């Protein structure tokens, strides 16, 4: 029995060491993204993203934490529009549109305050294809060792890519005028593993 316990202890130490080693060598820069095709011109899709109050119709984090309290400031849409949220599950943070290009691009600066502080940049791109719009939602930033460790154990980046996919599926539903909400995990998540930003 003593040898078995010693063997299991050594095995556990090896597993922990492996996880810590993987987290240590993972790149600090990450990019998470998801994309979908919407049966509408870019102008119709852009309008739902460029005006932050429209996010209430489709953004997935409100579905995950419906008691989130939102506050808006600045212009209603476009550069300078700002959104602050507080929720039991979603924590606290704020985002601000830093760049807006009509019907083609929206950039946002994100500042997470609780439960962990961090900063990221989100981007939406809208590409017209034969009367439809290809939309990509991405987020980039730098992760500290704690985030990399959690990503190794919990596959957090892949999970966030699926959340983005769900949000895009609901955005598609809103723009196309359909009523049924999207099921979790829908959409096409891509690039969910951490990658070095170029």
Image (cartoon, grey):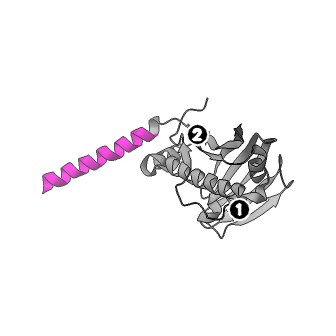
Of residues 23 and 65, the one nearer the viewer is 65
Spatial separation of the CA atoms under disc 1 and disc 2? 25 Å
Q: Which residue is mark 1?
A: 57
Which residue appears at 46% of the width and 49% of the height? Answer: 155
Crowd class of label 2 (few under 14; some 14 to 19; many from 20; radius 10 Å): many
Q: Is residue 123 above or below residue 180?
A: above
Q: Is residue 17 magenta?
A: yes
Regarding mark 2 in the picture, which secondary structure is present there? strand
- Where is residue 153? Give x, y as percent: 42, 50
Front position in the image: 151 or 48: 48
Which x, y percent locates residue 95? 73, 52
Q: Is residue 188 visible?
A: yes
Viewport quadrant of the N terminus: bottom left
Residue at the far front in the pictured view: 130
Which tag, 1 or 2, sits closer to the chain's start? 2
The structure residue drawn at horizontal position 25% and vertical position 47%, both measured from the top left corner, is 11
Q: Answer few, some or many: residues within 10 Å of disc 1's Cα (few below 14, many 20 plus, some between 14 and 19).
A: some
Give the residue at the far right of this rendering: 75
At x 74%, y 64%, the residue is 70
Span colored in magenta: 1-23
Q: Quadrant of residue 130?
A: top right
Q: Is residue 124 visible?
A: no
Task: Give residue 31's mark.
Answer: 2
Q: Position of residue 61 (x, y in %)?
A: 63, 60
- Which residue is at the front of the view, 125 or 157? 125
Q: Secondary structure at mark 1?
A: helix
Relative to 162, 1 lies left or right = left
Q: Nearer the viewer, residue 119 or 4?
A: 119
| Magenta segment, prevailing SS (helix, strand or loop) | helix
């Amino acid at each position: 029995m003593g040898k078995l316990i010693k063997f299991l202890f050594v095995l556990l130490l090896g597993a922990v060491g492996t996880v810590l080693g993987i987290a240590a060598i993972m790149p600090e820069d990450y990019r998470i993204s998801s994309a979908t095709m919407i049966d509408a011109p870019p102008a119709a899709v852009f309008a739902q993203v460029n005006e932050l109050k429209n996010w209430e119709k489709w953004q997935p984090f409100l579905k995950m934490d419906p008691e989130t309290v939102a506050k808006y400031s600045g212009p209603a849409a476009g550069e300078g529009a700002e959104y602050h949220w507080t929720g039991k599950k979603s924590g606290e943070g704020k985002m601000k549109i830093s760049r807006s290009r009509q019907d083609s691009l929206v950039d946002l600066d994100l500042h997470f305050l609780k439960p962990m502080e961090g900063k990221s940049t989100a981007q939406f791109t809208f590409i017209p294809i034969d009367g439809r719009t290809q939309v990509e939602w991405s987020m980039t930033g730098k992760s500290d060792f704690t985030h990399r460790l959690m990503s190794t154990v919990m596959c957090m980046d892949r999970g966030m890519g699926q959340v983005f996919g769900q949000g895009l599926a609901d955005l598609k539903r809103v723009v196309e005028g359909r009523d049924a909400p999207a099921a979790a995990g829908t959409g096409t998540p891509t690039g969910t593993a951490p990658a070095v930003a170029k």
